[in-house]
Image (spheres, rainbow, N blue to C red):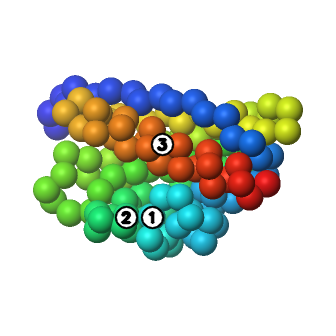
Amino acid sequence: MTNVDTRVIEQTVRIAAAPEVVWQYWTDPKRMCEWWGKTATLEPEPGGTCRVEMTEGPVMVGEYLELEPYERLTFSFGWEGDETPVTAGSTRVEVTLTPDGDGTVLTLRHTEMPADAAADHEQGWAHFLGVLVETAGAAK
């Protein structure tokens, strides 16, 4: 096995919705598709599938690793296919939900990210978390 230079991507946003509402956007396929993809297959239990087909075609493939309802979830993350530096399930995403008044502070940590893919994924998460802030905040 070769040593790959990796990075950690960490982003925090505040969402004007309770943790119970925000949780649904990470575990319910319909809600997931409102902010992150065009189709989703989600089995929110340890070892369950987490597969999201993006609008432009790439497919994120992983599995749920840990779930603490309304507080924290972790899933493996990567892209389907051989032409990607981030292969299916090769990295890890942890999402923490912290109550904040009538809203939620969401912190996303994406670890084990190959350095040459970090900037693209950092921009991607910033974009999609912005969409999540708007979508979940409007749902309340």
Q: Are marks 2 and 1 in contact (CB under 8 Å)?
A: yes
Residue on which disc 2 sits:
54
Position in image of residue 10 (x %, y %): 48, 28
Q: How far apart in space, not on screen, are marks 2 and 3 (Cα)? A: 17 Å
Secondary element under disc 3, as helix, strand or loop, is: strand
Taking the spot 52% from the left edge, 44% from the top edge, the residue there is: 129
The number of discs equals: 3
Between circles 3 and 1, the one closer to the viewer is 1
Q: Are marks 3 and 1 in contact (CB under 8 Å)?
A: no
Label disc, if present, on residue 37 of the rendered structure: 1
Q: How far apart in space, not on screen, are marks 2 and 1 (Cα)? A: 4 Å
Badge 2 crowding class, 10 Å Cα cut-off, few under 14, some 14 to 19, many 20 or more, is some
Name the quadrant of the C terminus: bottom right
Label disc, if present, on residue 93 of the rendered structure: 3
Q: Which amino acid type is shown beneath numbered disc 2?
A: Met
Q: Which amino acid type is shown beneath numbered disc 3?
A: Val
Instruction: Name the one closer to the observer, 51 or 122.
Output: 122
Secondary element under disc 1, as helix, strand or loop, is: loop
